[in-house]
Image (cartoon, rainbow, N blue to C red):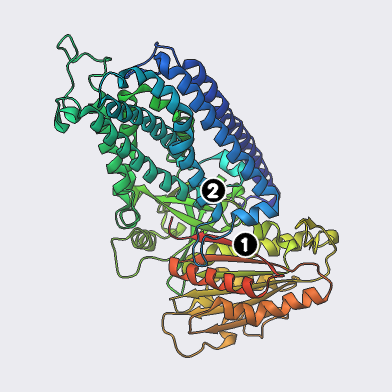
Amino acid sequence: MPPSTSSSSAVAARSKSVLSLLSLVFLVFSLAIYPASWVFGHFYAGVKTGCFSDVCDHVKANKIVVIRKNLAIFYSFLVFTALVAIAAKYLRVVRRFTALRISKTSTVTLGEVAWFALAVFVAAFAVPATNWAYYYAQKEPQAAKGQWQWIHVIFEVLAWLSGDGASVIYGLALLPAAKYSAVNDLLGLPYTAVVRVHQWLGYATLWYTLFHVSVGLLDEQWGALSFFQLLFVPRKGRDGKTTWGQENYLFVFGAWATIALIFVVLTSLSFVRRKAYNVFYISHFAVILFILFSYFHASMSIFYAIPGLALWTLDGFIRLASRFKANVVTNYVKEECGYRTVTVSTVRAVACKPGQFLRVAVPAVNALEYHPWSVLRATSDSVTFLFAPEAGSDKQWTAKVGKYLDEHAVNPADGSKPPRFLLQGPFGLPSRLALEHSSYHSIVLYVGGTGVAPALAILQHILDDRASDAENADKYLATVDAKTETVTAGSRTAALHVYLFWAAPAPGIERLDALQALIRDVNGSDVQLTLHLYDTSRPGRDVEDHAIAPTTTPAQPGLAIHATRARPHLRALMNRHVVEKVVAAQEAGAQSARVGVFVCGPERFMEDALASVASFQGEYRKVQVETEVESYAL
């Protein structure tokens, strides 16, 4: 006998309460890591106990002050970052500024570039600037001994300074490495931006490390040893022995740390990630060797890595625990268009919000390989995904998953065990367009391929939210003050116009089950939906409009549907549909019309879309356009 609705709701409520409590504990613990790491580093500087490095430079008198100053700069920069992120989260003026694109077609934002540039400045200039005079004062007597000694001193000081900078920047690179990050969620940092900055910091760490190694070798070249001897042969001390802890292995472990880092960076390049994911995934663990070898090289390198390592370790335990919880597939549909929808039971469903995604692994296909799948629909105890098996290649992961599910589809009659998935997440920020839909006059969802999944999740949330809150008239429609850009709740004076433009190289997309269900939900809602579908598999003749109606009857009022075999152009579509509604809103007395645009699809598709949005904004400057982008690239 199936469980009653009330019992299911009670179970969902309990699950949500437990997850909320665990999330709170996780957040408090994550936040505590930062001040605890700073305090530990500050007081551990100068303590010899527990040092396993060949060069315990944190106990040297000339290093203690340097470490404490650098730690102050490091954590002050993190505090500054948190303050700016909070401002961007709650102040629309700051958010719009940081969300500006660096070019009309780029998904990279000004906030990402500015933060990365500032991080490099802190590591490459701010840290050396505060320590240069102090280091040089230690070596100035040596510079006065001979005509060329000052060159040797400069190289040695540069080696010290670049070592400080490399340690700081690699400490920053570790912070975004954790997938589960309660701090990032609290600050409202976009997942794709965090991943992108993590990649940039990794590249910067490599270049700074190479510079550090180069000046160190140039410094030592004043001696009689060759490069090979310096890098791979331990030096002998005055006693003729290669004793550990007397800087005899300094260059050996520095060289191996650099080699490990080069290996990690090369196997992290985008074409490796896309073509050989397992190579990327497994080789990324070589970063542990880089961390260890760097620490054996010089103990000071670990001080800035402590918070990132702590967060990464915590994240690792959470992801490891998820591997022991298999989630059962409860429904599987082979869509007419060739796409697949798969529903999986999971307690994670109650935490999913529109616009978020889960990392999915199928043990029967590959237990190590996880892929991000946007949530198409989430209930109290299950999530539904939409995916497209890779056409023309049985070796691609999605093709293997599709084949496996085709052969092991859920069939309770034969008593076979249903397929099982491993899930991690949810990750990413909830869509602001979904959560703040009442403050928009129009919302445009412009998506390609399986990018329709988050778009349908956003639209479904809007329909559900407006239906459940229909009695709260003061929630709709919010107004936006043109000067302060603050949102003020108003009366429900107008319907919300939503435009879904979906292009996919798949005939029959108009009959996707999830789309048909959503069309039925539009009936009776105050949401006015305009739906344009573009079958790009065979450009040519149009598909009859009535073919995508929920039944054989004409589409209900408030729903405009059109399907065609052509390619869309966002600027033309916005001119045709959005402009009229924006002008009408302004004529009705709205101080500022606000339009939300969600874009998801392949890279070229998004570039064209962003160019269209930029062109639209350039012409209609009084319209506030806010764009959300979900990239396939990361």
Q: Nearer the viewer, residue 398 or 326?
A: 398
> Is the C terminus in the top left, top right, bottom left or bottom right quadrant?
bottom left
Structural distance between the alpha carbons of marks 1 and 2: 15 Å
Q: Secondary structure at mark 1?
A: helix
Crowd rating for badge 2 (residues with CA inside 10 Å; few <14, some 14–19, many 20+): many
- Residue 248, image x and y in percent? 22, 19
Please say whether residue 505 is visible from this viewpoint. yes
Residue 31: quadrant of the picture: top right
Q: Which mark is residue 458?
A: 1
- Residue 58, image x and y in percent? 40, 18
Residue type, numbered disc 1 = Ile
Instruction: Relative to 49, say whether 524 is above or below.
Output: below
Chain-order first, disc 1 or disc 2 = 2
- Residue lying furthest top in this view? 239
Residue found 75% across the figure and 58% down from its top? 485
Tags 1 and 2 in contact by the CB under 8 Å rule? no
Residue found 36% across the figure and 16% down from its top? 51
Q: Nearer the viewer, residue 428 or 236?
A: 236
Q: Nearer the viewer, residue 584 or 24?
A: 584
- Residue 478, image x and y in percent? 79, 61
Please say whether residue 321 is visible from this viewpoint. no
Q: Secondary structure at mark 2?
A: strand
- Count of numbered circles on the image: 2
Please state if 27 lies on the left or on the right of 65 as rendered: right
Q: Which mark is residue 426?
A: 2
Crowd rating for badge 1 (residues with CA inside 10 Å; few <14, some 14–19, many 20+): many
- Residue 15, image x and y in percent? 62, 41
Residue 207: quadrant of the picture: top left
Residue type, numbered disc 2 = Pro
Instruction: Relative to 237, say whether 83 is above or below.
Output: below
- Residue lying furthest bottom in this view? 541
